[in-house]
Amino acid sequence: MLTGAVASCFILSFRAVARAQRIAWLRLECAVSGTLDRVGGALRFTNFVTRVVLTIPESADVAACERALRKAEQGCLVANSLDAVRELEFEIVRAAMLEPVAKAG
């Protein structure tokens, strides 16, 4: 449930950032995985990896999309409330090409 909350928050954050920056996009897929570890005798989440595939129109600005994805990750209230390492991995795909144009990880 916690990883689902992080994913939902990321999606909502991205939508807000994209709207504010007038970024055109077609589809956003997001999955979050969390690592549970025993720390100081207690079981807790120590790491979250957010994996995103963003599909954009052929004419969209890839650099602006990358910045928006990073800003959404930094602005996610749920993830910011957690004491764990966070990672963002993303792939940006142009709709007409259906090939990755940018990949981070």
Image (cartoon, helix red, strand yellow):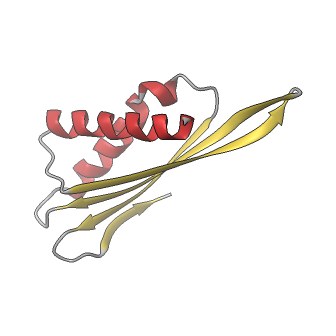
Pick the residue in front: 89 or 67: 89
Q: Where does the image place residue 99, in percent across and percent down from the top left? A: 29, 76
- Residue beneath the point at 24% across and 35% down: 17
Q: Looking at the figure, which quarter contains the N terminus?
A: top right
- Residue beneath the point at 34% across and 45% down: 69
In the depicted structure, whether residue 37 falls above or below residue 62 = above
Q: Where does the image place residue 79, in percent across and percent down from the top left? A: 50, 30
Q: Is 92 positioned to the left or the right of 31 in the image?
A: left
Q: Where does the image place residue 43, in percent across and percent down from the top left? A: 79, 32
> Extreme front residue here?
1
In the depicted structure, whether residue 77 falls above or below residue 104 = above
Pick the residue in front: 5 or 50: 5
In the depicted structure, whether residue 58 falls above or below residue 2 = below
In the depicted structure, whether residue 57 falls above or below residue 8 = below
> Extreme right residue here?
41
For residue 55, what is the image quadrant? bottom left
- Residue beneath the point at 21% across and 77% down: 97
For residue 101, what is the image quadrant? bottom left
- Residue beneath the point at 10% across and 63% down: 59
Q: Is 102 positioned to the left or the right of 6 in the image?
A: left
For residue 42, what is the image quadrant? top right
**Numbered marks: total:** 0
